[in-house]
Image (cartoon, rainbow, N blue to C red):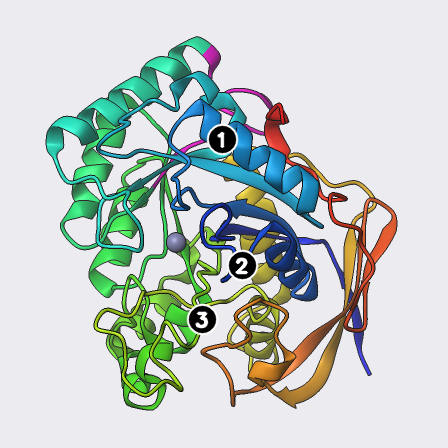
Amino acid sequence: MTHLRLPGLVDAHVHLREPGYTYKEDFFSGTAAALAGGVTVVLDMPNTYPPTATPDRLIEKARLAAAKAVCDVGLFVGATTTHADAYLPVAEQACALKIYVSDTFGSLRIDTLDLMHRLFRTWAAQADKVGYRTSAHRSGLGPITVHAEELMLPVCLALADLYSTPLHIAHVSRRSEIELIRAAKERGHTVTCEVTPHHLFLSSDDLPRLGNRGDMRPRLATPEDVAALWANLAYVDIFATDHAPHTLAEKGIGVGEPPPAPPPGVPGLETLLPLLLTAVHDDRLSLDDIITRCVSNPRRIYGLPEQPDTWIEVDAERAYVLADEAMCTRVGWTPFAGMRLRGQVARVTLRGQLVYDQGQLLAAPGSGRVLFGVEG
Ligand SMILES: [Zn+2]
């Protein structure tokens, strides 16, 4: 039995669903799933109900997270067509700004140039006053993170370039997109990007088997797209899960009549590390590839504080078949069910406290911290 000791991982893209959708997940169940996956920091997206688009909503969300989380939590603010950049007074207390330019779950889609231009312009103007967070400068603003697929990607690159804003591209899934990001990086643009495990380990070929269990945005891409992501891993800064739980009933699975529009999104917090460790076992990745993309790069890109005396212990060789029943997420399923994996989190220590031990959660609700000093 090989035991590995690794730093606590960062999952820079999760949807913990609180407030508004706590029957799917909340700050307690979602951060418990994080610890079970070896993740000690999550960055939570703003498309809750109501959305995290104003100072009041960020403060309310921070209060909920501070009371319930068992790992550390950073909170995104989001732009909406009705509130525009109303988040600006609390921009420094958010881990970053999220803009949904492409189709997704919730009400945050931005689809006019007028509003897009304003969001980049005012974020940059705010940064002129307070700076951007970097390894050397721990206060200030985070990047602008976008869900921008296909032709919306060059729009965001151009706006970020125009205003010199750090830009992070969430869940890249296509060959065309990773190739454009590669070209932008080679030409010196300050763009970073992330890829999810489902876009690395599943493809559209799995859809007949998965049905709505394989429905998310961006959708599962072709095997050619998946191969291009693997071929261009050197240009992928972050592995993040886009943990986006919905119940199986909402997905139309196990119910008589499937709903007309099942919500897109799949859970992923608990399967991130086992999938990546399986890829290490199969010689497709190195451990260093994981640490770079799940610890050091997200920390640098979002200016996250270090977590002292924090580590995870992993049984790296343990082989098992992944099952829905083993999941801690409130929705209790995984799109990777049935896969044979290697590597399982045995123990998690956060700031010197053993918080997870062989399937047992030992942390009390509220022991996680909300990052960037949001006043609860
Ligand atoms: Zn997402």
Report x, y in % for residue 168.
Answer: 37, 42
The residue wearing badge 1 is: 58
From this viewpoint, is residue 141 visible?
no
Q: Which quarter holds ligand 1?
A: bottom left
Report x, y in % for residue 22.
Answer: 52, 55
Could you give the CA–CA distance between mark 3 and mark 2, rounded to whole angstroms?
A: 9 Å
* Residue range corresponding to the magenta coloring: 130-145
Going by the numbered disc 1, the residue's amino acid type is Leu
Could you give the CA–CA distance between mark 3 and mark 1, rounded to whole angstroms?
A: 26 Å
Q: Which mark is residue 32?
A: none
The residue wearing badge 3 is: 247
Identify the secondary structure beneath mark 3: loop
Classify mark 1: residues with Cα within 10 Å, few (<14), some (14-19) or many (20+).
many
Going by the numbered disc 3, the residue's amino acid type is Thr
The residue wearing badge 2 is: 25
User: Any magenta on residue 140?
Assistant: yes
| Camera-nearest residue between 294 and 257 | 257
Whichever of callouts 3 and 2 sits on the residue coming sooner in the sequence is: 2
